[in-house]
Image (tube, grey):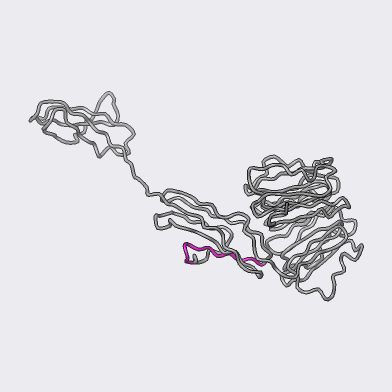
């Protein structure tokens, strides 16, 4: 049976025992190839997969809910996902370790600990991309600089001085690659099989991927793929709505949110937050994700804002007495040795019994009443 249209593909690049991953447009993760250690035995998940990575003999993947699953060879604990790990937006797998990038820009690592690949720098914040080499790790910060740690036998963890304006990183066996905003590829580390000899005639690159001893470079951009559409919501007046789209796209990527057919000013991120909701906010919201390869529009998310009902409890008193007689309705808020009763009103009964509502008691935690014949 042919494989459905795929949106994410990753291949084991560390060993001759090759196997492959593919995530279909429906979020199903497929694997094939060498399965010596169960690396092709993808675990089931109630949520769709958004990203996957192939290590030496293990796999790791994240789902739409931000949770992580890992499977396969576990000698170094590379499939022991840390407890409580959530909000994960990207994963990467090395020879014997895994990396996870969280939505808050922090990086979590687990697996082999004796080579330093899991020693995430304490000052690493605002990460936007990660890459796991055989025994070293890379992270790209939001300020377009690169951080590296782990084994450094061939300089694979020594970031070139002054390297800035980086938009993507990739890690191979014991060498590293950075892609800059102008499409240039900057390599460092091991140069076996000329892995760090970038061809002089290489056009501006969109994607670079480092293998065990070879490098792939994509020189044209495919259009974005929507991985997860924003979800429809029903919320009360005054609440806050958070809409999110997850997309796979070659950078640079732009976002534009729409309310119906109207572009929302300044709504140019992957998330849209609407505060103090009112009925006028109800309707369809969609987002257009664009890059150099084209644009894709998400499925609309329907936002329904429910009208609020302001309910205030009011004491209703049942007055019993003689029709035609006037009575004084009195109260105190606290009963004590001496009570200063306050008169609410003098009421002449027209029915027996007759109701009286104390509107002044709204918000009052306690109140005591009595009825006396007026003089």
Outermost right residue: 192
Name of the residue lying farthest toward the front: 1
What residue lies at 70% left-to-right and 53% top-to-bottom? 23
Of the pair 253 and 106, the residue shown nearer to us: 253
Q: Whole-percent x and y of residue 63? A: 66, 48
Residue 350 shown left or right of residue 144 in the figure: left
Query: Which residue ends up furthest to the top in the rendered image?
Result: 337
The C terminus - image quarter: top left
Vertical position of residue 203 compared to residue 314: above or below: below
The region drawn magenta spans 252-262
Left or right of 131? Residue 153 is: right
Q: Is residue 11 left or right of residue 341?
A: right
> Horizontally, is 149 left or right of 104 in the view?
right
Most common secondary structure along the magenta stretch: strand
Tell me what residue is drawn at x 47 percent, y 62 percent: 259
Say how many tags the image has: 0
Residue 257 part of the magenta segment: yes
Determine if residue 295 is in view.
yes
Q: Position of residue 345 (x, y in %)?
A: 17, 36
Q: Is residue 116 visible?
A: no
């Amino acid at each position: 049976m042919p494989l459905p249209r795929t949106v994410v593909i990753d291949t084991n690049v560390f060993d001759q025992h090759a196997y492959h991953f593919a995530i279909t447009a429906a979020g199903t993760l497929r694997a094939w190839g060498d399965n010596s250690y169960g690396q092709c035995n993808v675990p089931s998940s109630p949520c769709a997969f958004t990203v996957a990575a192939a290590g030496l003999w293990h796999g790791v993947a994240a789902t739409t809910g931000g949770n992580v699953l890992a499977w396969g060879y576990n000698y170094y604990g590379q499939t022991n996902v840390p407890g409580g790990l959530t909000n994960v937006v990207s994963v990467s797998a090395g020879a014997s370790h895994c990396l996870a990038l969280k939505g808050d820009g922090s990086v979590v690592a687990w697996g082999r600990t004796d080579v330093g690949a899991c020693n995430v720098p304490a000052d690493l914040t605002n990460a936007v991309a990660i890459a796991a080499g055989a025994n070293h790790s890379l992270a790209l910060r939001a300020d377009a600089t690169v951080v590296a740690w782990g084994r450094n036998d061939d300089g694979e963890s020594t970031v070139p001085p002054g390297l800035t304006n980086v938009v993507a990183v990739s890690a191979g066996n014991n060498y590293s690659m950075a892609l800059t905003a102008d499409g240039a590829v900057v390599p460092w580390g091991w140069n076996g099989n000329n892995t760090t000899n970038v061809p002089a005639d290489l056009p501006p690159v969109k994607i670079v991927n480092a293998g065990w001893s070879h490098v792939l470079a994509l020189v044209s951009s495919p259009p974005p793929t929507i991985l997860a559409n924003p979800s429809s919501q029903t919320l009360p007046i005054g609440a806050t709505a958070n809409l999110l789209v997850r997309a796979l796209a070659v950078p640079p990527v732009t976002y534009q949110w729409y309310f119906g057919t109207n572009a929302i000013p300044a709504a140019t991120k992957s998330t849209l937050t609407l505060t103090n909701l009112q009925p006028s906010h109800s309707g369809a919201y969609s987002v257009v994700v664009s890059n150099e390869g084209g644009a894709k529009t998400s499925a609309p998310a329907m936002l329904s804002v429910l009208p609020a009902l302001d309910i205030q409890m009011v004491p209703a008193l049942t007055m019993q007495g003689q029709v035609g007689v006037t009575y004084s309705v009195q109260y105190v808020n606290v009963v004590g040795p001496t009570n200063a009763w306050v008169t609410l009103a003098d009421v002449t009964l027209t029915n027996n019994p007759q109701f009286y509502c104390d509107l002044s008691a709204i918000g009052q935690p306690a109140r005591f009443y009595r009825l006396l014949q007026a003089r």
